[in-house]
């Protein structure tokens, strides 16, 4: 008799339990707007990146400050097979040139200003890749792509590393993105009619991004093409400064 009572109580408790609420967003624009606002209010974060696009493999880590005026960041990446420091401050991207390559750059200074359309030797070789990489570290960039060209495929409440999170799968339409492409995609990818690629986005309870994964394999067929960025320590202290003026060539 006692066993039967225990079973009935367990069934009653299960029937009365509150189901998990559904994910907060069913529309890509609303998702992007909320996560962008949460990123700005979050103020700052540490991040790590893992890029695998064709033969290009790179890992990096850094810290960023977010605000209405844009994003500033400091990161170290191994894009050239050895550590390289990048700093994005007030819209200007600086790269610390590896010591063995400074004679080739021609300035003799440890830092250079990098521009996607720059005419200096360093920018001509790496300007496009580094500016795309810096943009990709900024969650507002991917969220802007989701707002412009995204369609939510699925959404669920789950956990990431044991922490509650909302997980969204979004398809991005290349034709709607135009020339605003993720790092690693060549400019002529924008002309691929009907081209789509998936993005996965995990948000914390405050709707701040904790992980973003872009899978570019459908566009770069036959090659592994994935960019993973993780964010942590939201609102923590960060130290982001431009290089000393005398060290910039």
Image (cartoon, helix red, strand yellow):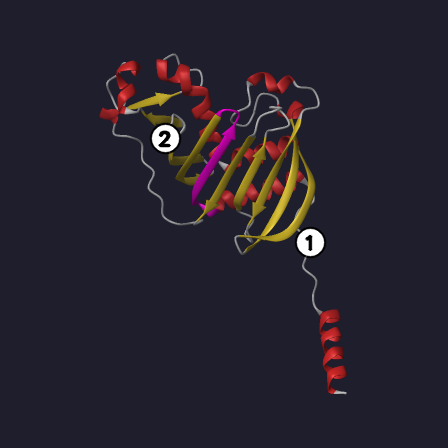
**Magenta stretch, overall SS:** strand
The answer to if 54 sits in the magenta stretch is yes
Q: Label 1: state its secondary structure.
A: loop
Q: Residue furthest bottom?
A: 1
Q: Which residues are magenta?
A: 42-55
Residue at left offset 24%, top offset 21%: 109
Picture coordinates of residue 70 (x, y %)?
45, 34
Picture coordinates of residue 232 (x, y %)?
45, 48
Q: Is residue 5 left or right of residue 247?
A: right
Residue at left offset 68%, top offset 57%: 21
Where is residue 123, by image quadrant?
A: top left
Picture coordinates of residue 121 (x, y %)?
36, 13
Q: Label 2: state its secondary structure.
A: strand
Evaluate whether residue 57 shows in this view. Answer: yes
The answer to if 154 sits in the magenta stretch is no
* Residue named by callout 1: 22
**Residue 86 marker:** 2
């Amino acid at each position: 008799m006692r066993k039967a009572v225990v079973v009935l109580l367990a069934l009653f408790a299960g029937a009365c339990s509150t189901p998990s609420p559904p994910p907060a967003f069913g529309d890509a624009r609303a998702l992007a707007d909320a996560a962008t606002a949460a990123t700005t209010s979050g103020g700052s974060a540490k991040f790590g990146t893992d890029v695998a696009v064709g033969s290009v493999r790179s890992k990096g880590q850094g810290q960023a400050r977010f605000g209405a005026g844009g994003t500033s960041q400091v990161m170290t990446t191994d894009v050239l097979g050895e550590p390289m420091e990048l700093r994005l401050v007030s819209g200007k991207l600086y790269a610390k040139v590896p010591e063995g390559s400074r004679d080739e750059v021609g300035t003799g200074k440890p830092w250079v200003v990098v521009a996607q359309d720059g005419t200096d030797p360093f920018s001509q070789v790496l300007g496009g890749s580094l500016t795309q990489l810096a943009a990709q570290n900024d969650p507002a960039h991917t969220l802007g792509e989701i707002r412009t060209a995204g369609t939510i495929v699925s959404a669920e409440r789950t956990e990431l590393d044991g922490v509650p999170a909302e997980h969204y799968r979004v398809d991005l339409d290349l034709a709607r993105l135009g020339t605003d492409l993720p790092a690693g995609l060549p400019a002529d990818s924008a002309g691929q009619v009907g081209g789509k690629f998936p993005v996965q986005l995990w948000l914390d309870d405050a709707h701040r991004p904790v992980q973003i994964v872009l899978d570019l394999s459908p566009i770069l067929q036959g090659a592994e093409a994935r960019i993973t960025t993780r964010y942590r320590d939201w609102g923590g202290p960060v130290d982001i400064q431009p290089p000393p003026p005398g060290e910039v060539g």
